[in-house]
Amino acid sequence: MNNIDDITLLIDTGASITTLSTETFNSLKTQYQATLVGTRLFQTANGTTKGTVYTFDTLALGSYQMNNVQIAILNFDMKGNIGGLLGMNVLRRYRFQIDQENNVLLLEKK
């Protein structure tokens, strides 16, 4: 059984926490790996909204694997196949560069 979810995220260096849309979260095969932390208010570009925070046991970003990553689930709709926002709680774990010419996120362990 394949317990891997591939999700396309938009890089948002202004987001303190990685977020998924409610629709994307509900479609995950790996929901059972998430532990409910609680609800809180988030400041977004569209104002203040309430979201639910979960801690995922394991999260892979390319070939890198992280443990105990918090992700906020918010009720929003992204265009196309974007499932959420990749925030600084994940990005700060790495040295990263955004190669805009090739649309690639380059990561290196700190």
Image: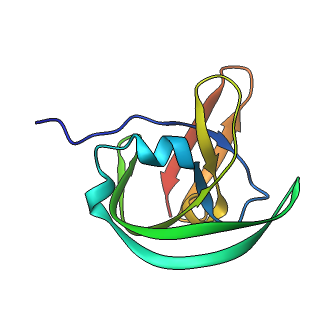
Position of residue 48 measured from the top left corner of the image (x, y, whole percent): 84, 66
Left or right: where 78 falls relative to 62: right
Left or right: where 83 falls relative to 88: left
Residue at image position (75%, 54%) is 13
Near-viewer residue (15 or 51) = 51
Residue at image position (41%, 74%) is 36
Position of residue 87 measured from the top left corner of the image (x, y, whole percent): 65, 57
Near-viewer residue (89 or 46) = 46
Position of residue 107 measured from the top left corner of the image (x, y, whole percent): 53, 46
Near-viewer residue (85 or 24) = 24
Quarter the N terminus occupies = top left
User: What is the total number of numbered labels drawn onto the structure image?
Assistant: 0
Quadrant housing residue 99: top right
Where 82 sits versus 55, above or below?
Answer: above
Residue at image position (88%, 53%) is 46
Quadrant housing residue 17: bottom right
Position of residue 84 measured from the top left corner of the image (x, y, whole percent): 61, 44
Structure colour scheme: rainbow
Residue at image position (53%, 70%) is 53
